[in-house]
Amino acid sequence: MTRRKTMGERMAAGPELLMAAGDPFTTAPQVAQATTMVATALIEPDEQNMRTDLGDVSELAQSISELGVLQPLLVRGKPGGRYGLVAGHRRLAGAVQAGLAEVPVLVLGELDDTQRDLVMLVENLQREDLSPIEEARGYERVLARGVPGGQSGLARKIGRSQGHISKRLALLELPEEALEAVEAGKLSVADAARLVPLAGWPERIGAVLANVQRYPGMSVASEARRQLNETEEAARLAARVEALRAGGVPEVAGDVGFSEQSGPCPLGWLRVSEEEHAGQPCHAWRVSHQGLTMFCMDPGAHRSDDDQEDQPAGVVGLAEPPWLIDQRRRQAEHEAARARQEASGARRLAFAAELVRRSESCAPAFSARMWLLGAGSDSLPRLATVAQVLGRESTVAAIGDDDSVPEHDSALIVESMFGSDSQRAAERVLYAIALVAGESIATGWLDTDEDMAAARLYLEHLQKAGFVFCEDEDELVAKLTEKELEAEGAGEEAVNA
């Protein structure tokens, strides 16, 4: 299998190799075999240059004044003996600032606007200071010219994956506020990508950016996910309301009180499921700040005289339906699983405290990895738990249950955790924080690759140190390993695409 050339290799081979032989999209431009010197006054910068901001060229001008222009500019001929600049806008600006009257150029032959855009795009992609948004707009402009094969065809020409091009183009769906934040370096490309699912709701994106700025501990990933969940829930609610109205189901007015005797009565008060009640003439609904609530307008229609005599006050309905029995069973299973998780967590923290107490090196490599993996996590280690692992019971009592430490006691709390200024004390504190961070992440949502990697690192660290896993912990490690392998497989597919 022949290895595809990289973008750098294609550019090094010359612009003519950007155009495939026989490609109806363009005909390969002829390039001068040698450089020629052209007066800077005769070279016209392209108004549609993909690099919208040339930035400060002072350092480049200084280098040019000492060494000259080391890489020729690419130009195309224009009427009247002038030249249109295709690639090298910063070099031209630097040369002008350095006072050069002439610069070396390579003159391209017949070159239409489509070829110009493609050559300009590839040349600019080699420059590290091309912003992601400028890159995306470059792809957009070239694709608008009608590249055969669309994104895949363009990817083959420039040596980038189709997935990379698609992700960059998706950024252009964001509102201008987000694009400006990316350009200014206030929003990373990864975080901007997390906002793309919200592109149809610019007010939601504005809320994410405002909240992240207002609350330093909040991540773009978590807030974007929360806003997306709210958006999806609102869409589901709107769809349900539309279906209810289309079906002629009456709406309960907001100023009407509840009554389990005469109605309207929330279905949750009755032993009847929404599915069982949906076809009844007494079926109704209301939307409030709590969401959609289904009602029965005639509770008496669902009970007999015997039911009213035999059942305690406040209970309406006949024998328990299967859905309620299943709901209680699932609730019991959930509570049992939660109890097992709490017991496992207590065992792990007790083992962590023993590790901190007896460890000689305090596992600096583990601590460093956990810090790096947990940097973007929403699961923060509790101060009281760190003190507990360190064996500082008096500190735990001083902090209380909610980690709220009075400002004037903060220094005392920190000192009590360290106990001294020795390197050994500092290593113990860092090790304890890393272990508690691992426990916090492992018992959290685990909804990012970083969280899953951190949880797996933490659990495997305990296991290597002698901790014996229970069945739930074995299942969790197996699940995390499977997820990590899936992520690696997806990454390889994207690279090989």
Image: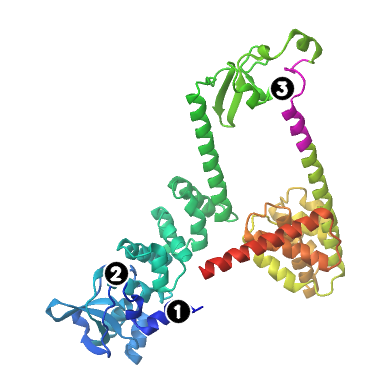
Residue 94 % position (x, y): 31, 81
174 above or below 101?
above
**Distance Cα–Cα, label 1 vs label 3:** 68 Å
484 above or below 22?
above
Question: For the residue carrying disc 2, how many other residues have a C-alpha within 10 Å: few (<14), some (14-19), or many (20+)?
Answer: few
Q: Nearer the viewer, mark 1 or mark 3?
A: 1
User: Mark 3 — residue?
Assistant: 271
| Residue sitting at x 47%, y 65% | 164
Q: Is residue 410 highlighted in magenta?
A: no
Q: Nearer the viewer, mark 2 or mark 3?
A: 2
Tell me the magenta residue range: 313-330
Q: Are marks 1 and 2 in contact (CB under 8 Å)?
A: no
306 displayed left or right of 136: right
* Earlier sequence position, callout 1 versus callout 2: 1
Amino acid residing under circle 1: Lys
Residue 68 % position (x, y): 32, 90
Secondary structure, mark 1, is loop
| Residue sitting at x 35%, y 75% | 20
